[in-house]
Each structure stands twice: as structure tokens, then as C-alpha cells.
């Protein structure tokens, strides 16, 4: 069967079915075929998958070997193991990328108690200077240092905070 890719991807499509019916395999097969040939490929198109079950990473990892124009990036929100570092990147979503309503939906915030707090917190963060952010991280690190019981978890938490702020020590000689 042949189909016009401009018409197919120019409108909304859905692949529906029960668990185990082959929805993921169908999507992987469509996209693998779509990018298989240099001459008739959909080069320049962009697809974003939120692969919460890890079904597509292996399916799309070899696309660039068939077509050098294809670039596949894998992002994760989980901690990256040493063995996975080669093709995984940390997914970062800046807080300002979503509006308050989208954050409320994502976090399933209740209207009466959590939503007002979320609005205040997001409004507060938009007005922070770099020095204020550094101060918050420094206070967080001191809190962990002074209040965590286990030295192992204390160290892990402090290192994680330093990595998030991309801490680089500097010496002020003035």
C-alpha cells in the first residue's frame, strides 16, 4: 500500500487498539519505512515521542545508518547510568516554558489549596536574579549538611544540588 506522506502527516492521525495489539510496532514500522530511503524520505520533518515505557529507543536508534540525514536524540528525566551516557541526554524543561494552567495540569494541582501556591511560586521564580538563585542553592546545601543524618545520602544530595546549579568554584582575589 502506498500513501501520500504529505496528506497522511498533514492531518491528525490515531492508532488505537488494546494492550499488546501492536500499536507501538505499527508506529515504529511506519517511521522506519518513512526514513528508509534518501530519495523519498521525510527528511526535515520532526517527531517527538514521550516514550514512557521505553518502547521506541531501540526501534529508532539505527535510523541514521540507513539515512545519514536523520538525527535521533534520546532524552530522559531519570538519572543516567554510565552505560547509557553515550546516547542519552538529560531532558530539561525550563519552568517558564509552561504557563500556570499547564503546570497545574501536569502536577494535578487542586484548585483550592495547591493552585494558589503554585501561582505564587511560579510568579516568584520569574523575578529571581542569578545571585538569588545561588543563595537558594547555598541555603539548600547548608540545610542538607546540617540536617541529614547519613553521610552517604548527605554527600549524594549535596553533589546533586551542585550539579544542578553547575557549580564551579571561583576565587575572588580582590
Image (cartoon, rainbow, N blue to C red):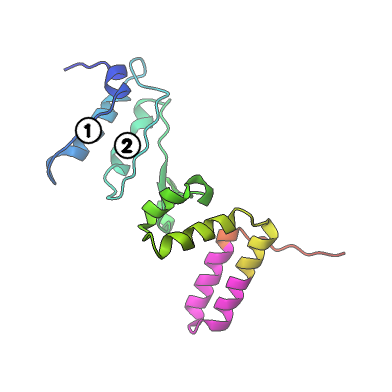
Residue drawn at x 50%, y 71% as measured from the top left = 156
Element carrying mark 1: loop
- The C terminus: image quadrant: bottom right
Disc 2 to disc 1, how far (Cα)? 20 Å
Residue drawn at x 40%, y 28% as measured from the top left = 70
* Residue closer to the observer: 9 or 166: 9
- The N terminus: image quadrant: top left
Q: On screen, 21 above or below 145?
A: above
Q: On screen, 134 above or below 26?
A: below
**Magenta stretch: dominant secondary structure:** helix
Q: In the rendered structure, which segment of residues is drawn in magenta? A: 139-162
Query: Mark 1 = which residue?
Result: 14
Residue drawn at x 81%, y 64% as measured from the top left = 172
Q: For the residue carrying disc 2, how many other residues have a C-alpha within 10 Å: few (<14), some (14-19), or many (20+)?
A: some
Q: For the residue carrying disc 1, how many other residues have a C-alpha within 10 Å: few (<14), some (14-19), or many (20+)?
A: few
Residue 94: image location, x then y, percent: 52, 49
* Residue closer to the observer: 93 or 42: 93
Residue 129: image location, x then y, percent: 68, 56
Q: Are marks 2 and 1 in contact (CB under 8 Å)?
A: no
Residue 78: image location, x then y, percent: 40, 57
Q: How many labels were placed on the picture?
A: 2
As drawn, is 63 to the left or to the right of 24? Answer: right
Q: Is residue 5 visible?
A: yes
Residue furthest to the front: 112
Query: Mark 2 = which residue?
Result: 60
Q: Is residue 146 magenta?
A: yes
Amino acid at each position: 500500500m502506498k500513501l501520500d506522506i504529505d496528506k497522511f502527516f498533514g492531518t491528525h492521525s490515531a492508532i488505537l487498539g488494546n494492550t499488546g495489539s501492536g500499536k507501538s510496532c505499527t508506529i515504529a514500522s511506519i517511521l522506519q519505512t518513512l526514513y528508509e530511503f534518501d530519495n523519498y524520505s521525510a527528511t526535515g520533518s520532526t517527531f517527538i515521542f514521550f516514550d514512557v515505557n521505553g518502547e521506541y529507543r531501540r526501534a529508532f536508534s539505527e535510523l541514521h545508518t540507513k539515512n545519514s540525514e536523520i538525527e535521533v536524540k534520546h532524552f530522559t528525566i531519570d538519572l543516567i547510568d554510565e552505560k547509557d551516557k553515550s546516547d542519552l541526554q538529560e531532558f530539561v524543561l525550563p519552568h517558564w516554558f509552561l504557563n500556570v494552567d499547564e503546570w497545574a495540569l501536569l502536577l494535578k494541582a487542586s484548585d483550592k489549596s495547591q493552585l494558589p501556591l503554585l501561582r505564587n511560586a511560579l510568579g516568584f521564580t520569574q523575578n529571581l536574579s542569578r545571585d538569588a538563585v545561588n543563595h537558594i542553592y547555598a541555603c539548600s546545601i547548608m540545610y542538607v549538611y546540617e540536617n541529614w543524618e547519613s553521610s552517604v545520602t548527605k554527600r549524594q544530595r549535596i553533589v546533586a544540588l551542585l550539579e544542578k546549579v553547575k557549580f564551579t568554584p571561583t576565587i575572588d582575589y580582590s
